[in-house]
């Protein structure tokens, strides 16, 4: 059987655009001789659809689109994700039940519908909010081959009592088709392969795994779908592989009787910092495209974070579409200004300098009658960050530029950032990138370019916000960056972190900072998720709680 | 049987504090001769606990606390909400299962545990993220009376196939005890009474309904729990009633054989604007207390929104703990400055004036080399809002004051607000209060005070942001405020709104504004929920989607 994997990027809530794209890929797959073409989860409506699931007009339109797609699939079978409705049954809030479903259509008919059995309700997923679980197993014959249908989580059954894949095989499937919208995090590709091979070891059947590509709004954070669609044959060999982070239509042949593919294809792993970089580039590119921005801007401080964001933006949007602004203050060092300028030159960005001294003075003059003439300390440090934030927003407003915020995950974890200041922006590019990973990406960038695109000095110097004389960041990032990850990503409690060798005083200090900074994160711009635990809807901590010792 | 309803305010994640409070109320109930004392849902851990559910140390502590509470309940039975664990079973993410549970304890023993059957997974609720559903019915005898236990949603069974209350009655319960953490919205008290009476009409058994009180972080918005605990006897008469928005221990007697209370008590409804006002006061008070603020500040513009927020803050924290700052610009009218000053005098607030002209000039000077010397239009309007936002934050930082943001729900819906400007703050007091309701609250305040605490001029004048000469708000709020509510709260689509009599052009304009302003709301400070559909986690719309016509 010749099968095509249609690894597409869909539009959330854009039924017409999705229908057009699906129809076009059906025609291309047919032209390539495919007997079956497989699209990602929810392909007709986009994923995650969020509360648009509740819109009756959208549900009606996508159902009508499915009927047209069935007719479009003339002489070829297509597996297409959509929303199946059951108007006669209700959820707890009185809405009629809907299902996350995949239809197998051919020659104008809907031959089978599988309703997703396993609905993830953890981390960034909240599918039980929208969908009722299906319970049936769906195996349907196409050209003599019995296709077993499943949707995303149905395959990730390690901890579930329901084992969908085993049931499909028991029901006689020759090949398992999994349609997914499974977001990327670093290492996900390896996890995915282990999972597929574990199932194949068990059942001996090939799995065709088709994943969505492109970055979407996961509510409180961008989810990047990496594609990375795979076909693994019954012997565990990768026989087809779509590229990562790009749309593709990949066709391959499978001997459905033996479960074997025609030949194995190369499937080399991608190094972690490169995975992260590619995901971030795709995240910026798609956020800008979805929200209608052609160009972006960011503040360039000469530090490592803004340098890495500038490189990502230049790759995502083209260097000619990125404006870098240096906003030196009375405390800025010469080397910072140089490093910012050199970076902009290396990348070919437009670069402007706007000193903040005049505004800084004017604020102090306005505040003296109310706050007195003593030095304002932290208040004045925040004020400088807010002046820069307002200058950047003036450019964003005036030129319609997407402002990229440059704080990293370690800073965001510890609250080492200023609300309405350096946190300003439409997207916090590094919100899920710890300080250590930022350095890793910087080194990857320079290595891949074969030259110091990011000035060596930005990588080597001691990090500083330069908001007062002689200031440096109050953290030893070599220790603090992995420890913050341990507390946040691995949800390790204080005693456990100490048991793993960290100094108790440091652990308690950091755990407290993470806890009391939640209020800042609630007002942060969305980040791009690249780890298994990002800030945002996947980690819902209270703004205030007394801490572990109470 | 003598029963005590312990309507308490718990600390989310504060097991020690909750245990102390529960123990104290058990002793007081016993001293009052009660045989049974009932606490709210999740009383030992607080509700909503959010991702603190995942903390093993907290789970262990609250389980140990329950054992101690069982011993404290000597000679009296107590129903206490806690988290029940099942270490042998797992959720989809591999965590062991936990249940939202209530224990009936007495004389050192846990006599019964009910696991919540119905777990809400809509609006602001996401209990399936944390809890597995219980399936059993729990009826336990205390002093010869058979007590049927249920938890919150178990009672709200209209659309569920499982009918917990009916099953409890079928299992022989003489009285139904419902422990709740059921958040307030306007009209909730009436809904609650209708629901209780519908069940009682059906089963003829008394219901003791004990609800938590106090405002808590619902993740992306404050949930206000109004208490309003009730006992309704088997004839449908209210025989005990705890106050709204306050802690209380209310004791009453019930003839368990006949299901009748000794006598009916008064149960007068509260007018809607007063409900809203009380909820907002409680919201501000508890947010400040939880986050450690004694004092607050806000910008006073002379308009209706900031006037209403000032009154709420003065009631919540005391007028001596509220700082009002007027920040006039070149475009501010004299009457605005007068109205702001008069309001501050009426309330007894501290009042300061900080003109923004100097900072405004300095920004323009800094921007001219980059943006040119032409008038900046909207950019400059936003800049003024951001100057005010930064001045307020300087005061917040320097004096440790909670900044209250003053935008209302209609503005937030339509994006008529400036990120990093007037949206700055720890709490957006009116985020769930439409413009029409703001006026209603203002009239309520003046009526209740018997004088114009809020200047009549602030109520009567045409709303204006005063960011350019002669500017007034570009909305006829009499039409726009209810229409925005229709689109947001009632999720009405464009055609339906037109069918209900609204002008199509207006509907389309507003629907578009609501749609494209989502990015601002994602960075908004938490609001206080007072309607059945607030912005925040209860309404998860994408930042970008093509709109209904696609």
Image: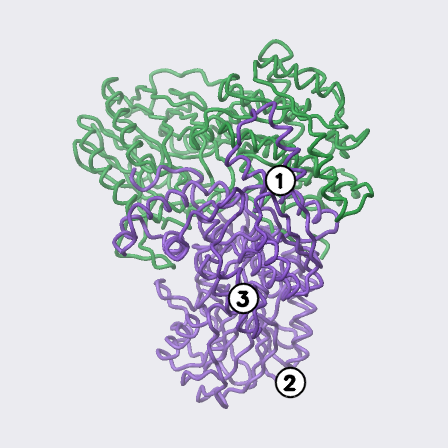
Chain colours: A green, B purple
Q: Earlier in the sequence, mark 2 or mark 3?
A: 2
Q: Is residue A441 in sight in this rendering? A: yes
| Element assignment for label 3 | helix
- Which residue in the protein does label 3 denote? B277
- Which residue in the protein does label 2 denote? B32
**Category of crowding for the residue at label 1, using alpha-carbon neighbours closer than 10 angstroms: few (below 14), some (14–19), many (at least 20):** many
Q: Is residue A408 left or right of residue B463?
A: right
In the depicted view, which residue is nearer to us: B446 or A213? Answer: B446
- Which residue in the protein does label 1 denote? A420
The spot of residue A236 in percent (x, y) is 42, 24
Same-subunit check for callouts 2 and 3: yes
In the depicted view, which residue is nearer to us: B432 or A67? Answer: B432
Observer-side mark, 2 or 1, equals 1
The spot of residue A153 in percent (x, y) is 42, 40
Q: Residue at x 33, y 16 (%)?
A: A262
The spot of residue A238 in percent (x, y) is 41, 21
Query: Residue A119, located in which quarter of the rendered image?
Result: top left
Query: Residue B340, located in which quarter of the rendered image?
Result: bottom right
Label 2 and label 3: CA atoms lie apart by: 33 Å
Q: Is residue B316 left or right of residue B524?
A: right
**Category of crowding for the residue at label 3, using alpha-carbon neighbours closer than 10 angstroms: few (below 14), some (14–19), many (at least 20):** many
């Amino acid at each position: 059987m010749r099968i095509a994997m249609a690894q597409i990027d869909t539009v959330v809530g854009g039924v017409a655009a999705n229908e057009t794209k699906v129809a076009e890929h059906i025609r291309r797959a047919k032209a390539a001789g495919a007997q079956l073409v497989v699209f990602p989860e929810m392909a007709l409506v986009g994923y995650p659809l969020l509360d648009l699931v509740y819109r009756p007009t959208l549900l009606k339109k996508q159902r009508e689109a499915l009927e047209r797609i069935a007719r479009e699939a003339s002489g070829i079978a297509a597996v297409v994700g959509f929303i199946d409705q059951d108007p006669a049954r209700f959820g707890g809030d009185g809405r009629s039940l809907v299902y996350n479903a995949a239809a197998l259509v051919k020659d104008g008919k809907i031959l089978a519908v599988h309703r997703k059995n396993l609905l993830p309700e953890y981390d960034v997923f909240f599918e039980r909010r929208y969908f009722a679980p299906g319970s049936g197993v769906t195996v349907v014959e196409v050209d003599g081959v019995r296709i077993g249908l499943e949707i995303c989580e149905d395959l990730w059954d390690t901890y579930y009592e329901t084992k969908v894949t085993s049931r499909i095989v028991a029901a006689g499937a020759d090949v398992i088709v999994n349609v997914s919208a499974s977001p990327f995090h670093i290492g996900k590709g390896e996890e995915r392969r282990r999972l597929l091979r574990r199932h194949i070891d068990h059942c001996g059947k090939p799995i065709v795994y088709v994943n969505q590509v492109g970055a979407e709004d996961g509510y409180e954070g961008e989810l990047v779908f990496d594609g990375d669609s795979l076909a693994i044959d019954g012997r565990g060999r990768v026989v087809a592989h779509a590229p990562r982070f790009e749309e593709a239509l990949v066709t391959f042949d499978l001997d459905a009787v033996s479960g074997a593919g025609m030949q194995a294809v190369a499937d080399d792993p991608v190094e972690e910092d490169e995975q992260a970089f590619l995901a971030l580039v795709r995240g910026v590119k798609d956020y800008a495209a979805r929200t209608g921005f052609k160009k972006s801007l960011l503040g360039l401080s000469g530090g490592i974070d803004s340098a890495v964001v500038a490189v990502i933006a230049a790759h995502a949007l083209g260097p000619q579409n990125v404006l870098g602004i240096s906003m030196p203050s009375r405390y800025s060092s010469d080397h910072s200004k140089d490093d910012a300028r050199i970076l902009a030159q290396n990348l070919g960005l437009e670069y402007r300098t706007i000193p903040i001294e005049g505004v800084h003075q004017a604020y102090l003059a306005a505040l003296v009658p109310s706050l007195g003439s003593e030095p304002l300390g932290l208040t004045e440090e925040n004020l400088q960050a807010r002046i820069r934030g307002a200058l950047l927003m003036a450019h964003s407003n005036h030129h319609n530029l997407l402002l990229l915020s440059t704080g990293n995950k370690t800073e965001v974890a510890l609250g080492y950032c200023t609300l309405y200041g350096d946190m300003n922006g439409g997207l916090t590019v590094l919100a899920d990138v710890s300080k250590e990973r930022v350095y890793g990406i910087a080194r990857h960038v320079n290595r891949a370019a074969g030259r110091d695109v990011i000035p060596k000095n930005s990588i080597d110097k001691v990090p500083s916000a330069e908001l007062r004389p002689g200031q440096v960041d109050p953290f030893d990032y070599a220790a603090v960056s992995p420890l913050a990850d341990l507390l946040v990503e691995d949800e390790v409690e204080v005693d456990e972190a100490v048991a793993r060798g960290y100094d108790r005083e440091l652990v308690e200090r950091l755990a407290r900072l993470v806890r009391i900074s939640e209020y800042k994160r609630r007002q942060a711009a969305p980040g791009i998720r690249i780890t298994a635990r990002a800030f945002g809807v996947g980690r819902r901590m209270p703004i205030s709680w007394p801490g572990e010792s109470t």
